Image: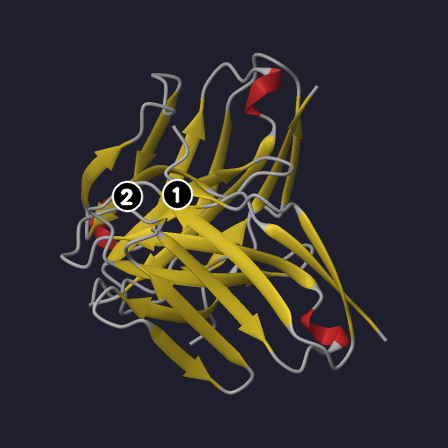
Amino acid sequence: DTGVSQNPRHKITKRGQNVTFRCDPISEHNRLYWYRQTLGQGPEFLTYFQNEAQLEKSRLLSDRFSAERPKGSFSTLEIQRTEQGDSAMYLCASSLGQVGEKLFFGSGTQLSVL
Amino acid sequence: DQQVKQNSPSLSVQEGRISILNCDYTNSMFDYFLWYKKYPAEGPTFLISISSIKDKNEDGRFTVFLNKSAKHLSLHIVPSQPGDSAVYFCAATKNTGGFKTIFGAGTRLFVKA
């Protein structure tokens, strides 16, 4: 068990470009979450999957954002036509979906939009 | 609408003394509360949790207290150690599953040697 893995760790892009992040959860975890964190704030919920089904999306997730979890394993988060306001740390977490819902986080992908 | 609030952005404590981090919540539906610790360049890691049916949970140097009537919880660290210096996030969720976890803005703890 190597924990939750996120790639890349850092991404610098120009405004208007598309970016894609990958998350590999802990293998036996059926729930996968995406959060976004900006400086001085806590993680903000974006979306979550139960196996391959995307069960909830935040209002924060505009139509430029799309997330997938094919086959209920790894997940990708794509941001189209990036804007400077998208600059943030994107965190992935997974869980067993049990009582108490303890989340295991990856180290995140730091996105900088120039 | 901030459902989980941590009103102290930072806290400085001398090594060996007690650290008390506070958290307030507004949503009565929350019935499970967690604290996470975050070091720079790492994701948050789970520290301790408490169910709403309890008012205290202890794990070594860490104790979480819950006051449901006041919608308030606190994390006590005693004795504080320099390695405890990190950002601490309070989080809340509903225990039935399928309910997202909501985080506070965090409190940065500095433990001085």
Question: Subunit of mark 2?
Answer: A
Going from N to C along the chain, the mark reached first, 1 or 2, is 1
Q: Secondary structure at mark 2?
A: strand
Residue B43 seen: no
Which residue carries the number 1 mark? A34
The image quadrant of residue A93 is bottom left
Residue positioned 77% across, 74% down in the render: B82
Give the residue type at disc 1: Trp
Measured as percent of width and height from the top left, residue B67 is found at 34, 61
Give the residue type at disc 2: Tyr
Question: Subunit of mark 1?
Answer: A
Residue positioned 28% across, 43% down in the render: A48
Which residue carries the number 2 mark? A48
Q: Secondary structure at mark 1?
A: strand
Within 10 angstroms of label 2, few (less than 14), some, or many (20 or more) residues? many
> Do tag 1 and tag 2 residues touch (Cβ < 8 Å)?
yes
Residue B109 vertical position relative to residue A112 in the rendered view, above or below: below
Q: Residue furthest right?
A: B113
